[in-house]
Image (cartoon, rainbow, N blue to C red):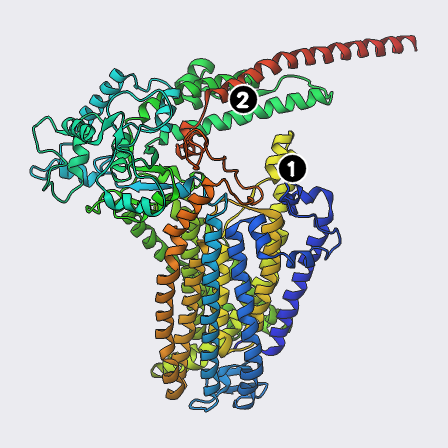
Amino acid sequence: MAANASSFGISIGLDAAICVIILLFFGFFRRTAWTEKFYEPKSLVKSENAPKRLPRSFAGWIVPTYKFKESDLVRLGGTDAATYLRLQRFGWELFLFCTLWCCIVLIPVHITRGTYVGEEIATGSTTYSNLDKTSITNLQPKSKALYADWISIWVISLFLYWQLWRYNTHAVETRIEYLNSKTGAGTEAQTVMVNDIPEVNKGIVSKLAAKIPGTGSRPVSRQSSRQNSRSMARRKSGTELDSFEDARTHLSRPSDSSDASYRASDSLAEPMATHHTGYANMLADQGMPPPQAKYNGQSQEEFMSTTQDRMVPQNGSANYNAPGIGFSAAPKARAMLDSGMSEQDMVNQEFEELYPGKVERTQIAYNAKGLTKMYNDFEKTRGKLETVLDKYQMKMEHHKKIKKRETVRVIGARYGKWGRDRYGAKPQKVDALEFYPDRLRELWDRIQEEQGKAKDKALSTAFVTFKDTFTTTIAATSMMHHDLRHWSTREAPAPRDVLWQNVGLTSSGYLGAAVLAWTLFSLLAIFYLIPVGAVQALLQVDKLERFKFFKVIMDVKILSSIITSVLPGIVLTIFLALLPTILSLLNKKVQKMVSETDVEFGVVRKYFIFQVITTFLGSLLVGSFLNQISEFLDNPKGIVNTLGTSAPQTATFFMSYILVQAFIKSPMQLLRLPGLVFFWLKYRLATTPRQKAAVWQDTHLKYGTNVANDTIIMLIGLVYCVIQPIIAPLALIYFAIGTLIWKYQVVYVYVPLVESGGKLWMQIFQHIITAMMFFQIIMIALFGIKKSPGPAILTAPLPFLTIAFLLYNLNLFNRPQVIISNRTAADIDKRQSQGGDLAEPLMQQQVPSPSEESGYAGPDSRQQLDRYIPPGFTVESSELDEVLSETQRVSPQVDSYIADNGASSGKQSSRSNDIESLT
């Protein structure tokens, strides 16, 4: 037996009361001075685009928040934030329609044409509550009233098709607007990510195959000799990377395709011409000049002849450009590398041949895991030193007493040989302004040494930046080589979005990682079915009242109502709270996704699938089994008929779940009570302005769990809106509250960690289609169980229509969401050439102005393109010099300040003693 109308009403009242209490607390805390940096940080930013301050009254934030338009959300929160709010709006529009239709049409039909209308009636082993009077359970098998449900399914499905078409069209328009904005046309809009570079960082299988005679691959033992030959060539040309600055320059500058020394200037070599007339004609169609037939002062024929001669392997094998070279892309790459050409030069030349005159910069990725660890240690140590300096300066400026210099407890063994030699093995206290600078110098030396080693650890991934967006679009969407095992290209993630530790695997490596990740995910979903079963058992606690403990609980009506109506939703929510962190780690550590955006989208996808398996299907099947367990045991052959009766009764659990999500979880996301506690503690412990600013600035929003939570509510509401129409207004309440709360959050609180420019919508679209498929298939099965072939047959075309609608929409809208069209790319280039731009969203990273020296309206060659370098290569000597010079300036001031305070204290003490003696 599910909860009856009385207990369900009590649960609504309790949940609503909790919601009101949470909102009252929020209204109170929002008005206090010390929490405004937690609840309205973006309104405190000094910017023209900062949102207006809200009234200080309890409910003064509600109306202004609801009035924000989508353009305001894009400006203040970013395109992805506006896309997420579009999901909220889609939800309340859908369930507003469902609520009106179901309340007007279905509920009267279910009540008046039903059979079980008493308070609580038992039929066989099935017990019906008065809450079942409004559901399809109340209708007899073969009832003509089931045609009303069939009509409702078609009406709701057609409404969904119309709504999805409107929203898909608007999503593409939003995507185009983003790409044409200043922030949209950043470095990533003109960069492609190249994977599977042949003969670079070969995997284990390739290395083993290379040892087998007749495989056509060169022996692995030649790898070291090839690197040595390139090192000798670099030393002869003066390009050996002996220092940090040399390594950083090698990474950031354009690669010359020849093996001669790099040009002293930062500009690219003049591009070589090409015989690719199709590409030249394409440029002509866009009004762009054809490529120049010069490269480093040579004609195309001269340059190609010289280069090909250099590329002939020493064993006298055929030229790699000769006809009949074969299918593989490896021989050409092997010849180029064996000649002494670096991996970066090889990539640069390959793209120059395909897109002559259009390559701005090539940057290959390096295996710098050890360097990254040193870099993180360097940044951490520098931050600690800056904190100590800030503390000293703040105390001296405010004339506060400094008793003694700050010390650090140092255990030399923790810092390796350097630490043991300098500080010994035993712990000792060291002056902070002595230890931190020494540690920074030691790390600096190690970083320079490691950077020198990293140049010979190239990975099979590179980032190629072009001079215009149009060429980038062609490169990202074209088949670069007929050997699909090599030279695969895709649009590049934003530089700040790249997860460098995951860059460099081959396509087969990424495939294997994905298989492993999805296997672990499947096992995790199976494991989580255990708590789902326990939650459903709480709903059926009256089945266990033959035990004394449960009978005592069921005799107390208020406790029975809480256990059967409130507690299951809360327990399931708690079990699901840990899952997002697990899925995020799965995407990063196991599946090796290469960007934060990929990780977030992966969480969205996996979390939704997980919720479908556990929250929806698990609760549906387990709840149905527990609800009619005695019937299953007594009459196993009647399982289908029993499911037809018991499955609709699980709607009570899902109504409870939606109530908890709407009235408790969503408002708690607004209040963020645990975050408020941690904010207060961190702010109290922060002693410098720098530390205090870090506490409240840049609160990032991640969409992984939020999107999946909303779409699973949409799935539940959609599946059950015909089965139990009361669920439709509950889903409407959920999305109405969610719209208010998340408008406030994206405008006043959260800053996007990454920005995909609206790609999020296609994930949402696929989730909604999944919900429609479950809705239609379950209703067909339910009509069959109800022995009503007419409604079942008439509903049967809908799943096929939904699949056709999905395929058509994916064909029409998916590619414009994922890649930039040639038309849009040409428009972007034209706008950049004219110097036009749009306003940037608040608190997003500024995009440098176009470079005038490079001769094109693209990203700045220094400030922008260097950002594709791994973090370990981005440290500059000026950063170290700055903090060390500041330490040298402050340290003697501290000594003088302490001495002056000591002298004044001594005089004060002497004066007090004299007064005492006189007294």
Q: Crowdedness of circle 2 by 10 Å Cα count: few (<14), some, many (20+)?
A: few
Tell me the kind of residue under disc 1: Tyr
Q: Position of residue 715 (x, y in %)?
A: 47, 68
SS of the residue under disc 1:
helix
Tell me which residue sits at (46%, 67%) in the image.
Answer: 164
Is 430 located above or below residue 294 in the figure? above
Q: Position of residue 519 (x, y in %)?
A: 32, 54
Q: Crowdedness of circle 1 by 10 Å Cα count: few (<14), some, many (20+)?
A: some
Tell me the kind of residue under disc 2: Arg
Residue on which disc 1 sits: 683
Compare marks 2 and 1 and give the one earlier in the sequence: 2
Is 637 located above or below residue 289 in the figure? below
Label 2 or label 1, whichever lies nearer to me, is 1
Is 76 located above or below residue 522 in the figure? above
Horizontal side of residue 391 vs 607, given as left or right: right
Of residues 554 and 326, the one drawn nearer to the viewer in this rendering: 326
Of residues 5 and 612, the one drawn nearer to the viewer in this rendering: 612
Of residues 303 and 160, the one drawn nearer to the viewer in this rendering: 303
Tell me which residue sits at (63%, 48%) in the image.
Answer: 748
Tell me which residue sits at (19%, 46%) in the image.
Answer: 483
Horizontal side of residue 675 vs 464, given as left or right: right
Which quadrant holds the C terminus? top right
Q: Position of residue 736 (x, y in %)?
A: 60, 64
Q: CA distance from mark 2 to mark 1?
A: 25 Å
Work out whether residue 461 can be spotted: yes
Work out whether residue 428 can be spotted: no
Residue on which disc 2 sits: 409
Tell me which residue sits at (58%, 55%) in the image.
Answer: 742
Q: Position of residue 298 (x, y in %)?
A: 23, 26
Q: How many marks?
A: 2
